[in-house]
Image (cartoon, rainbow, N blue to C red):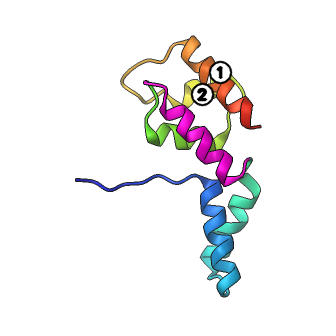
Amino acid sequence: MSSDHYVTLAEVKEMLDAEAADHELTPEQRYALDQVNKNVKVSASNAQKLVKELRELPFVSEAQAVKVADLMPTHVDDVRVMFAKERSTVDKKQLEQIIKLVEKYL
């Protein structure tokens, strides 16, 4: 049984900030923190709420929900690209549902 758990970039930022408060970060950790600071668009709590709401949609997996929360797409085409590798197709109405959820947290 797999115990994979996906975390958002916002959660990674919180983890690295907490680590930095305790002791000096390694060069890799500093680089990672710099990258998440540049790319995180929402707080960790809002990211978690968004992931939870996205997971309530039957066509969104946990990995997809986390990716959406990380990227915070604002256009249907951006979401379509994120779902392009999936075996099932996502229609425009479903993509618009995702965009509406994302807009709540921007």
Indicate the quadrant containing the C terminus: top left, top right, bottom left or bottom right. top right
Q: Mark 2: which amino acid?
A: Val
Q: Is residue 28 left or right of residue 74?
A: left
Q: Mark 1: which amino acid?
A: Val
Q: Residue furthest bottom?
A: 23
Q: Is residue 104 left or right of residue 8?
A: right
Q: Which mark is residue 76?
A: 1
Report which quarter residue 44 is drawn in.
bottom right
Q: Going 61% across and 58% down the picture, which residue do you hit? A: 11
Q: Position of residue 84 (x, y in %)?
A: 48, 27
Q: Is residue 75 above or below residue 2?
A: above
Q: Going 65% across and 41% down the picture, which residue do you hit? A: 71
Q: Position of residue 68 (x, y in %)?
A: 59, 38
Q: Position of residue 90 (x, y in %)?
A: 48, 18
Q: Position of residue 8 (x, y in %)?
A: 58, 52
Magenta highlight range: 42-58
Report which quarter residue 77 is drawn in.
top right
Q: Is residue 75 above or below residue 72?
A: above
Mark 1 and 2 residues: CB-CB less than 8 Å, in contact?
yes
Q: Which mark is residue 79?
A: 2
- Is residue 18 in the magenta section? no
Q: Residues within 10 Å of mark 2 (few under 14, many from 20)?
A: many
Residue 8 or residue 34, whichever sits in front: 8
